[in-house]
Image (cartoon, rainbow, N blue to C red):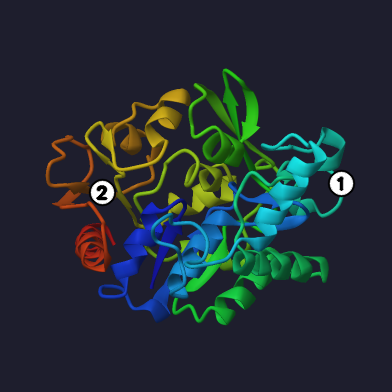
Amino acid sequence: MVTFLAGGTGTPKLLDGAAEVFDPAETTVVANTGDDVELGGHLVCPDVDTVLFSGGGVLDTDRWWGIADDTTATDDELHRLADAAGLESGPRFLPAEAQTAGRDIARWRRFSGVAEFMEIGDRDRAVHITRTSLLDEGNSLTEVTETLADAFGLDVSLLPMSDDPVSTLINTDEGTMHFQEYWVHHRAEPAVRDVEFRGADDARITDAVADALADPVVVGPSNPVTSIGPMLALDDFADALADTPVVAVSPFVEETVFSGPAADLMAGVGYDPSTAGVADAYPFADAFVLDDEDGTDLDRPAVRTDTRIDGAEDAARVASAVADALSEVA
């Protein structure tokens, strides 16, 4: 049994070939939900859905977002209506009183759907409508995710990190904004001053996540701050990692990050944007998988390989290095 922590694109790319090394029937994926947003009344879970769509064989791997070859008729019409009515486009974060009204799972994640700032495909939107409707029927996010995983035929078990709301807010020199506004709309351009995981103090892991974290854990090459950070902000999640074997794959090669805003975010919260900084951010990690070109000297075991992942063959190679690292610490 093994559990992967997933956020962004790094871990889903690793999972693309992990089945060659780890039996999918004995693999659990715990996905970050700090990036979730409620857009126009529908709960969108980007990191859950990337695993869902990838495992279901429908992910748009050019963007690592949404469903391949999806249509966008509804998104197009939302923008036409906004233009015709003279409504301002861009993120429309709802006022504070609206953020704490309605369904609790969407607290501090609520955006208006007017001229939606995240392009949602039509088939993709059907997933969000189904998810939100099942939540409104009284199901937990864990139960809903299991239902959707069955619908997409996933071979692995997929869990959200919590059934409680945790919202990743980025404090920047242009003000505080939800991570998706920072990343999707502003393209990570505002300087990061700090990151807040609002709701984490009151959120708890589920029994299913607790059971999964009792198995050896793999932290994929995800963003340490906004992909893994929301999980670590949960006290019981962090405590569980301290009591189980953990191997982490660095998303850096020394000071060079493979993709995304990880370097700026790590610097913004006080970590060195490098493999050494990742090690500082992960004191619970017992071993690391580093790139062959990464000469960082760590105080823990490190297995080296070519860690760039451009397809299933690359992913299988990195997964094999993960297995080797686990064998040293498990």
Q: Residue at x 40, y 36 (%)?
A: 262
Q: How many marks?
A: 2
Q: Position of residue 44 (x, y in %)?
A: 65, 56
Callout 1: few (<14), some (14-19), or many (20+) C-alpha neighbours within 10 Å? Answer: few
What kind of residue is marked 2?
Phe
Q: Residue at x 78, y 43 (%)?
A: 84
Q: Is residue 169 above or below residue 250?
A: above
Callout 2: few (<14), some (14-19), or many (20+) C-alpha neighbours within 10 Å? Answer: many
Q: Nearer the viewer, residue 130 or 90?
A: 90
Dividing the picture into quadrants, the one containing residue 139 is bottom right
Q: Residue at x 61, y 61 (%)?
A: 72
- For marks 1 and 2, give the CA distance: 43 Å
Q: Position of residue 240 (x, y in %)?
A: 49, 54
Left or right relative to 130: residue 282: left
Q: Nearer the viewer, residue 239 or 271?
A: 271
Q: Position of residue 68 (x, y in %)?
A: 47, 67
What kind of residue is marked 1?
Ala
Dividing the picture into quadrants, the one containing residue 43 is bottom right
Which residue is disc 1 drawn over?
Answer: 101
Q: Earlier in the sequence, mark 1 or mark 2?
A: 1
Left or right relative to 105: residue 177: left
Res 178 seen here: yes
Res 219 seen here: no
Q: Considering the numbered disc 1 on the image, is that residue within a helix, a strand or a loop?
A: loop
Q: In the rendering, which numbered label is found on residue 19?
A: none
Q: Is residue 74 above or below residue 285?
A: below
Closer to us: mark 1 or mark 2? 1
Which residue is disc 2 drawn over?
Answer: 288
